[in-house]
Amino acid sequence: MPARIIVAAAPLFVAWLPCMASTQPATPPAVSKPRTLPAIVVTATRIPEPAFDVPASIDVVQIDATGQDSPGINASEYLRGVPGVLARDRQNYAQDEQISIRGFGARSTFGVRGVRLYTDGIPATMPDGQGQVSNFDFGGADRIEVLRGPFSALYGNSSGGVIQLFTADGSDPPEWLGALSAGSYGTWRVDTGARGTRGGFGYNLDLSDFHTDGYREHSRAERINGNAKFDFRTASGGKLTVLVNTVSLPESLDPQGLTWQQFEADPRQASPSALTFDTRKSVHQAQGGMVFTQPFDDGQTFRAMVYYGHRTVQQFLSVPVGAQQNPLSSGGVVDLDTDYGGTDLRWTIQRDLAGRPLELAAGVAFDREDQLRRGYENFVGDMLGVVGALRRNEQDDVYDFDQYAQGTWQFAQRWSLTLGARHSEVRFSSDDHYITDDNPNDSGRVAYGSTDPVAGLLFRANQDWHLYASYGNGFETPTFNELAYRPDDESGLNFALRPAHSRNGEAGSKWRFGNGGKLDLALFQADTRDELAVLGSSGGRTTYQNIGRARRRGAEIGLQLPLADDWSFEAAYTFLDARFLDAFTDCSGATGCNVAAGTRIPGVPRNLLDASLRWGGPLGWHAALQADAAGAVTVNDNGSQSAPGYAVFGANVGYVLDNGRYRFTPYFRIDNLFNRRYIGSVIVNQANGGSFEPAPGRTFLIGATLVSRQQ
């Protein structure tokens, strides 16, 4: 174990010594079972209310820094138990995690597309729809809200779903938190934080350092996350929240995907081209924001949010030297320097209409991304994997300007109606500064717009059972990466691409048990026209096209079931039938160009299950068994290749010791208990067939968290 881990961990265990020496707790902790409180959400309607009363599929994942028995490294640790969500750790930190919701976002080969991401209300998705979760800081987090279905469209472009992370408020009494974990393949994480309040001031600070040598060859990575939240209360009842977030990936190696033959020969190997060109990525990002909320005596509230950030990315690709002889090639090194920011102004009103409760929210949002994009050759003479000659230099800017409104009226004792709409305008511009005799001026402009209405109806059958139905429209523009190249080796951006428009409907049931359990059911269907898909991929250039209609429909089941004393069972199941409805031509691979109508959309399994059986109370010993299962996944548009389905199991055990002043939680976990060899994630439509990303075999992790409370 590196020396700096031991140094960082020493205060954690030293601080625990007084607790070990104490024979009598200063404040005996209560051991009774905690009372289950209704989850309050804001993502669906922008007004705090119980998730049970929202006519939409929305789940809350609570993040307890001392009770998860997981390292808190990746979003997939928390999202895999949410129905409708496919969240996979690629074992490749140069490409971020793979996240899709109800099949939206499945085509992404890196980062997250088609799903809106937020941290404390600040977008982690750029105006063009490209997002990333590497800046999600879980050490200081309180919860994640996951919204699926039609109401996601009220967040604008690329809203196939919404994932929002919330930082915890300052605690009373103040706390210091420390966490340490270490496991297989040189993986370790150190986290430290502090939370507290003093008068009208609250704070939550967190800093973490994560490192892994990687399961696969050439997959070493390090990530440093920092997050700070400061709350200031005003005499008039207002609240100002200041947020600062940083993430640094000094160097994340990229093993790339494997062909099926390479996977069968050795799943831990890297792609030969990854080693040849030393494929890797570095990211440095810092952002800050402020949120001011001012309530008024007459049930009105004003909220203003503003944010700004700066991000640099340098990525070395494995584009062959021969392919860069094309004068239109952008080279094999991507160098991005990005400034981004925006604001959201919102007014909410709580009134009565005809003697029944009415809640309204309306606002405007503006987001902008200014990106200096340079491309370089990835060779100098015979040296590969280095920065060579300049091949691309352009200023790519995109902004959105949106107006939205939504309201909920409980027009009868058992009925409530929610209506909303959002108008979005997204404008792209590209100014080319790399112009030669063989590479003409590729500057251009394009604008997209859409107005998307949403409606939902909720029926309270009784106090424990609610039924709902909702319907709405949504749209998704191409990202700048998808606009990057025109077909047939023509120069310039592919401004002929159109946004995809979808019509989404769902019907659901929410049932709460008297013993604290719940059962949520949802049926959904989304029909899309002008679906975006790959047209061709070769020589480091991937072009996209609009291919007609697609359909995503299925069912979700979310179950939380308390059993006997200290036993509980949880399960999240998704059935998803995602298909292209129209035939089209796709020349991205060597297996042919024709995609028949009815072919499955690649990247998503038809069946997905996460289940766990847990034992233990709030103190003392606890343990759990977990099962993750997924059906087969096609990896290209014509469905000629697929990754087989799998079922893997894991187990963890831990202990919670609390004397009022200190709370100490050591734990141990095993993942992939039976050491199964399987494909954990896929990269869709790889021309070279390298679509398969192997998951690790049996892995071990040991860790501990310590909370020290001021008296």
Image (cartoon, grey):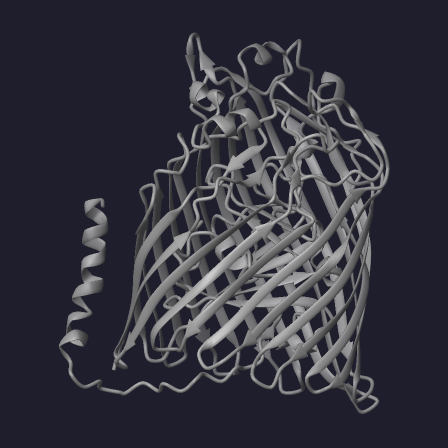
Figure check: 435 above or below 576: above
Residue sitting farthest toward the left: 21
Q: In which image quadrant can residue 347 be found?
A: bottom right
Residue 306 visible in this rendered orientation of the protein? no
Residue 624 x %, y %: 43, 65
- Residue most toward the bottom? 355
In which quadrant of the rendered image does the C terminus lie?
Answer: bottom left
Question: Is 136 placed left or right of 447 in the picture?
Answer: left
Q: Is residue 619 left or right of residue 136?
A: left
Q: Quadrant of residue 17?
A: bottom left
Say above or below: 48 vs 298. Answer: above
Residue 82 screen position, x and y as percent: 59, 61
The residue at the point 34 percent across, 41 percent down is 185
> Is residue 678 shown to the viewer in this render?
yes
Position above or below: 110 against 198: above
For residue 498, above or below residue 37:
above
Residue 279 point in image, percent of width and height: 46, 26
Q: Position of residue 440 (x, y in %)?
A: 69, 16
Residue visible at 46% across and 66% down?
63
Which residue lies most toward the front here? Answer: 674
Front residue of this view, candidates 638 and 38: 638
Choose between 682 and 283: the one closer to the eye. Answer: 682
